[in-house]
Image (spheres, rainbow, N blue to C red):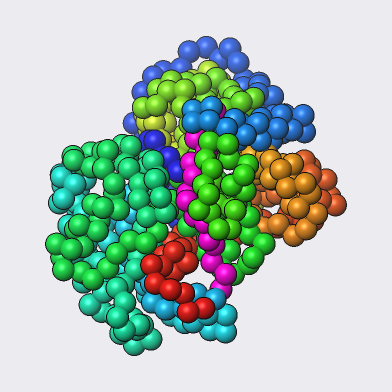
Amino acid sequence: MSVTAGTLAVRSFCITRSAKMVSRPRVVMAVGSNTISGASILKKLQKDCATPLPVLRHVADAMADDMRAGLAVEGGSELQMILSYVDALPTGNEKGLFYALDLGGTNFRVLRVQLGGKEERVISTEFEQVSIPPELMFGTSEELFDFIASVLAKFALKEGGKFHLQQGRTREIGFTFSFPVKQTSIDSGILIKWTKGFAVSGTAGKDVVACLNEAMKRQKLDMRVSALVNDTVGTLAGARYWDNDVMVAVILGTGTNACYVERVDAIPKFQDPSSTSGRTIVNTEWGAFSNGLPLTEFDREMDAESINPREQIFEKTISGMYLGEIVRRVLLRMAEAAHLFGHSVPEKLLMPFSLRTPDICAMQQDTSKDLEEVGSILYDVAGVNSSTNARNIVIDVCDTIAKRGGRLAGAGIVGILQKMEYDSKGLIFGKRTVVAMDGGLYEHYPQYRRYLQEAVTELLGPEISRNIVIEHSKDGSGIGAALLAATNSKYEHDF
């Protein structure tokens, strides 16, 4: 999953704010003559963002086509269709003590889980979250991985109680690494580049698993990585442990991505005779998709000013990093051209990313007559004093952007399902199939979630859509990595 413009606290969706309007904020840019109305800007926005059924069908079909092209040959599509090398998925029979490390940003989590097989399942779990010192984000590879290994070593020392390692075994760990990696096996992957504000020297082009294993040796930590996964693959594995019908996993948070279970013989660019199950998980990296998306002038301006123009267009249209920023740009145009908030444009409204997706989510939850919460948020975040009429227009703008995002995400999911259905000759739509969802955007934004489900139902029809179950799988990637460490253990399974 790629995030390209900083870090958004997706878990803080819909936090209420106190209404403090004691003085007018400092304003800049006197607005010129009123030549256009807020209503007319809104009407054009709604037209440009519209996602009627033909648009959704095109997006779903194009997603399926791009998936096939990406599976046929490296670089054959905008979608990278990265092979996870996951040959075996959790069954529920796994037993023993396993660890997980989830590294995907400025914080990382370490976790341990004691598995008890079908009868006891997850006996116990423990985890810690640790912030990475800022200087290590710009230091050397050895310094960063030594710090991570030292945290793991201290965490392992606290092992006790219900946690016990079978005699004669080395602790095994699943490593969730959410940076661009070219995976070469289930327990190895070459770092392509650091993202999310990291500029660590000496890692690009190296196997990140080897870097971690070597650091653990330096810390005299008796542990080895047996599975390297990204967060989407971990989410699928974690959900599959509880439900054998899980076939797809989607993350909708700050960024977005999707993965699914694919037949090995449907991947022309990869033929692995050693595959015992005949299936693997494919990481689509669907944030790069762009075919047929309904884009506005505000999307194009935001994209042009981003650090990766003309890239990650689907992500910039549907994920939590960007929805609030698109709304801010619309409101700024309304303030400048239509006097939506008076005759001056507040300075705060000129600041990119000052309005976050949790803010627009919170505003959409306001059901009061005068939309007092909307007024409070606009004042606190954007420095705006607003009338009730202006607040209603703001709500319509938020809903327009959330509706487009949710419905396009739903169309993307249907595209994946259509591709699987076509290749499996009816084994997807004809039975219960589960899509595991994780991420703060999906979890905390009810309108977005509803629009996503409505798009899936519209595209598939009421009868087929009854077989497609979209379930929330909260924080599944950590335990999913531990479970994949279990299924890929170097020791002979006793289950």
Answer yes or no: is residue 79 visible.
no
- Residue 346 position (above or below residue 271): above
- Residue furthest right as drawn: 463
Q: Give the quarter of the image for residue 18.
A: bottom left
- Residue 126 position (above or below residue 365): below
List x then y, in percent, for residue 296. 58, 23
Queried whether the magenta region covers residue 83, the answer comes back as yes
* Range covered by the magenta-colored residues: 77-92
**Which residue is drawn at the image coordinates 55% and 19% (left, top)?**
297
List x then y, in percent, for residue 331. 52, 29
Queried whether the magenta region covers residue 172, the answer comes back as no
**Which residue is drawn at the image coordinates 33% and 37% (left, top)?**
192
Dominant secondary structure of the magenta stretch? Answer: loop
487 vs 293, nearest the viewer? 487
- Residue 260 position (above or below residue 401): below
Apparent side of residue 366 relative to residue 341 in the rendered image (left or right): right
Q: Give the quarter of the image for residue 355.
A: top left
Apparent side of residue 460 relative to residue 396 in the rendered image (left or right): right
- Residue 319 position (above or below residue 249): above
List x then y, in percent, for residue 438. 53, 55
**Which residue is drawn at the image coordinates 35% and 46% (left, top)?**
189
- Residue furthest bottom as drawn: 161
